[in-house]
Amino acid sequence: MPQLVERVKLEAKIRQVDPQSVETWYWGGGSPSILPLPLVNTWRDCFSEHFPLVPGGEFTLEANPEDLDAKAIHGWKAMGVNRLSVGIQSFVDHRLQWMNRSHTGQEAKDGIRRAQDAGIDSISVDLIYGLPETSLGEWQDNVGEALALGVPHLSTYALTVEERTALHHHIRRGQSTAPVEDRAVEDFLWMRSHLRSIGWEPYELSNASLPGHRSEHNSAYWSGEAYVGLGPGAHSFDGVSIRRWNISNNNLYLKQMGENTSWFEEEHLRPVDRVNEQIMTQLRRMEGLSRNSMGALATNLDAIWASYISDGLMIRTAESWVLSDEGLFLSDRIAMEGFVAAGPHDTLEV
């Protein structure tokens, strides 16, 4: 682990041109809460040197519930962490066991309260809906447990089954039940309606918050702003046309960073790619996709999405296209139907 910290520090030095202040720090991708505090402090000092955080900027740290002990929380707060993203997933113990999580529902609640007692009030809780053999009532109880803790932000995700995972293997062998889409839809629609009724903003497909508590880091990502990612598997974007992603294998990252050989891949986006990304990410947001941003393509998109508009899955206003809750659950399909085919020279005018 110390070697990984040193390699990330080296990458920060290589990537830096001039020290540039940034609006947000987000430490995730593998729960940095498992790292000893001295190593986390080393990282923090390195980032402060090369990518200093603006005063009052959002500093999020992803944490496992079982890592939320008082000493760690106070240490993170002392180094400037002002927001936690906690992967609880469920408050039901046998569901947590099924997901191979090492915490219990009570441990998760206790950890959140310790963070609040330490003065970290900006906390996001991750929950998973659409689990096999569950009911709407169980999901309502899970959301209710999170709200009762007084957290101002929820990130919620439908269970997906990835190939070559333990869950995929168990389902194929009949050892686990496959998720049913109708269950996920029921959970999703109830949650968004309920959160609105109590004054929350379901501001993105997978995220909802009290007013003023949106994730600034993720909001910048959905808006297409530039960001720098450091470490294994981290992604970066220059805000214009270049995306890069680091090797995700820890050992290869360590080796190739140490040799200063290629530890990342890079993609140069064409104008059509940028437009398609904009369609995909902005349709996920509460504000929808701006018509002005699509320029001359707006009329074509009206025609392509006409059936969704007439069916109530999409609302078209003078300023934007906005998906209804039912439409949001189909957002990927709706977005892809609006993707623009590349021209003969891969150019596009909007």
Image (tube, grey):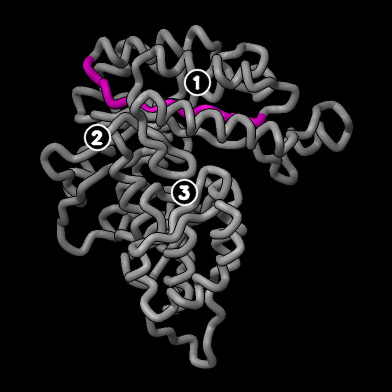
Q: Which residue is mark 3?
A: 232
Query: Which sits in the foreground, 321 or 31?
Result: 321
x and y percent of residue 2 in the render? 38, 35
Q: Quadrant of the C terminus?
A: bottom left
> What whole-number distance in Å separates the C-alpha atoms at marks 2 and 1?
20 Å
What separation in Å lies between label 3 and label 1 (alpha carbons)?
Answer: 33 Å
Q: Nearer the viewer, mark 2 or mark 3?
A: 2
Mark 2 and mark 3 residues within 8 Å of each other at the beta carbon: no
Q: Which residues are magenta?
A: 119-130
Q: Is residue 4 above or below residue 116?
A: below
Task: Say which quadrant the N terminus sits in.
Answer: top left
Using residue 230 as the reference point, say whether residue 23 is left or right of it. Answer: left
Q: Position of residue 225 (x, y in %)?
A: 30, 59
Residue at the image position 31 percent from the left and 29 percent from the top: 210
Q: What separation in Å lies between label 2 and label 3 (alpha carbons)?
A: 32 Å
Going by the picture, which residue comes out furthest to the left? Answer: 55
